[in-house]
Amino acid sequence: MSNIKITGKIPLVGEVRVNGSKNAALPILAATILCENPCCIQNVPNISDIFNMQILLQSTGRKGEFSKNCYLCEAAAEISPFASYDLASRLRASFLVAGPLVAKTGYAEVAYPGGCQIGERPVDLHLKGFSKLGITVDIQNGYVSLKSKKLRGNRIYLDFPSVGATENLMMTATLASGTTVLENAAAEPEITDLANFLNQMGANITGAGTDTITIEGVKNLSGGTYAVIPDRIEAGTYMLAAAATGGKVKVSNVLTEHLNPVIAKLRETGTQVAVGENEVLVEGKSNYKAVDIKTMPHPGFPTDLQAQFCAMLAGAKGTSIITETIFENRFHHLPELKRLGAKITTEGRTAVIEGTGKLNGAQVRAGDLRAAASLVIGGLMAEGTTIVEDNGYLFRGYERLVENLKNLGADIEIL
């Protein structure tokens, strides 16, 4: 377990450059299973989730090396269609290899995924879609077995615009015969990035970024070089940290159109946000307003920034209402923020935050990746010293977070 020590009440000032997107890189790495030739994936974040995906891919025969934010993977002479519980349990994105494996080999046996415990991780939408593509599904002893003699395109309606299901089915359908149409598909930027990668490798996908995606099946995908988009969640985390501390920070290497929901809500608090070309300048105020937030599928407010905004709103003037609609168990951070002096009540998926204007340092414990980021922001806001017991969560999703915050003037260190 790694502990992070923070002495708060220091405004963050300076510039921070955002890394590649974790949530885009993971499915793209899984998609390399489909490719006949070597792939070079650039702008990949140096985080533990990526290392775990690399190990998982190596177990399937897709060997690769990761160096200087570039993942170079060889063409696999032979693919093993098995993803063990030991490997899958480390990573919520592990099930994304299921589709590529069955598309490539006709068979896959993949353990149920693990990772952060932010809610149920049902794969029923994935499985319903697989069956529509001509895949036989069998579930036994915690493993999902998939078999297909020939993949056939079909029209698939998703009951919920699941990001993971959209990604898995889109990857699988690239090698299916005929046309596949995904309706009520997820529209997140990471979906578009995956589609762009697949298309560059030879796929024929249109409509990514909308609720209807059409995939014309091809016989094979080649290989090549591709750069992952910047991480909008990392960018939002730095923006909220700057605003919460009353600082002034330029966040660079961003796609500003991906940040519209967080920009809108920050401006609603009274925070100044200036949008430039591939950068945003955030200038916080000492007396900012409360706002209401409801997480929604893209282009709504992202669930992955809900926890960080909760920390900021604990110091706002007024009462905020936060509604979490994506995951049913994503309030791990709230009891810990209360240890810092936040006034919060919850009922189901709704939290009411009464801004106190003042937090005090305490020892707190992170329960998931974004909760860890929330508690770091809370510590930066608090009077005195905060110790965040992290258990490695931050390092699953943020590259050099502590170092970057220190460069912005924060009094923060890893113990």
Image: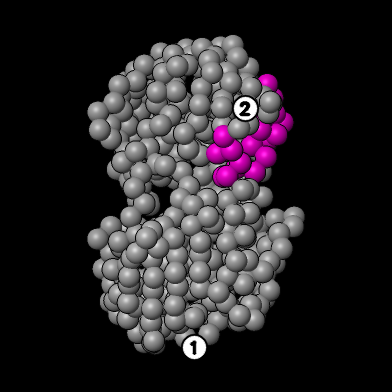
Q: Is residue 389 above or below residue 397?
A: above
Q: Is residue 317 visible?
A: no
Sequence-wise, the earlier of marks 1 and 2 is: 2
Of 20 and 175, nearer the camera is: 175
Three-letter code, disc 1: Lys
**Mark in the foreground, 1 or 2:** 2
Residue 381 left/right relative to 167: right
Of 323 and 277, nearer the camera is: 323
| Mark 1, residue position | 219
Percent coordinates x, y for residue 235 in the rendering? 56, 42
Residue drawn where x is 65% and y is 72% of the image: 39
Image: magenta residue range: 391-411
> Could you say which quadrant of the image residue 35 lies in?
bottom right
Any magenta on residue 405? yes
| Mark 2, residue position | 3
- Image quadrant in which the C terminus is located: top right
Of 178 and 172, nearer the camera is: 172
Q: Is residue 34 above or below residue 411?
A: below
Of 134 and 370, nearer the camera is: 134
Percent coordinates x, y for residue 4 in the rendering? 62, 26
Numbered disc 2: secondary structure = strand
Marker disc for residue 252: none
Percent coordinates x, y for residue 368 in the rendering? 48, 38
Tag 1: Cα neighbours inside 10 Å, few (<14), some, or many (≥20)?
few
Q: Is residue 159 visible?
A: yes
Q: Is residue 138 above or below residue 368?
A: below
Three-letter code, disc 2: Asn
